[in-house]
Amino acid sequence: MRTTIRLNDGLLDQARREAQRRGMTLTALIEEGLRLELARAKTPRPWVNLPVSDRDGGLRPGVNLNNNAELLAILEEGIPWDKLR
């Protein structure tokens, strides 16, 4: 099927160079990218309900969103939010 799409000139140039680098057509590169994006969109993302303070609506003390390793450890260990620092 044929269709027309409008792309930013810079993006189109970058895509053409990448397709050439990979030894594929621009159409094949665009199709591959769309397939990957559509497959990713079908994958459910895990949602985490962060604890919110009843007092001010912000995060409860002890929840550090800037420390991914610490937050992941807390989530994996199942530490109750009210037991944090």
Image (cartoon, rainbow, N blue to C red):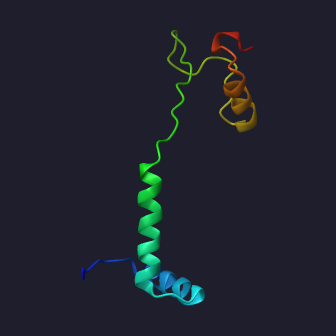
Residue at position x 69%, y 30% from top? 71
Seen in the image, is 14 located left or right of residue 61?
left
Q: Quadrant of the C terminus?
A: top right
Q: In this rendered view, identify the residue nearer to me: 55 or 63.
A: 63
Q: In this rendered view, identify the residue nearer to me: 6 or 4.
A: 4
Seen in the image, is 36 located left or right of residue 50?
left
Question: How far across and down, in percent of the image, does residue 24 sit?
Answer: 51, 87
Residue at position x 47%, y 79% from top? 29
Question: How far across and down, in percent of the image, does residue 43 sit?
Answer: 47, 47
* 67 shown above or below 29: above
* 66 shown above or below 35: above
Q: Quadrant of residue 72?
A: top right
Residue at position x 47%, y 54% from top? 40
Question: How far across and down, in percent of the image, does residue 2 sit?
Answer: 24, 82
Question: How far across and down, in percent of the image, does residue 63 sit?
Answer: 66, 24
Q: Quadrant of residue 82?
A: top right
* 11 shown above or below 24: above
Residue at position x 52%, y 36% from top? 46
* 6 shown above or below 67: below
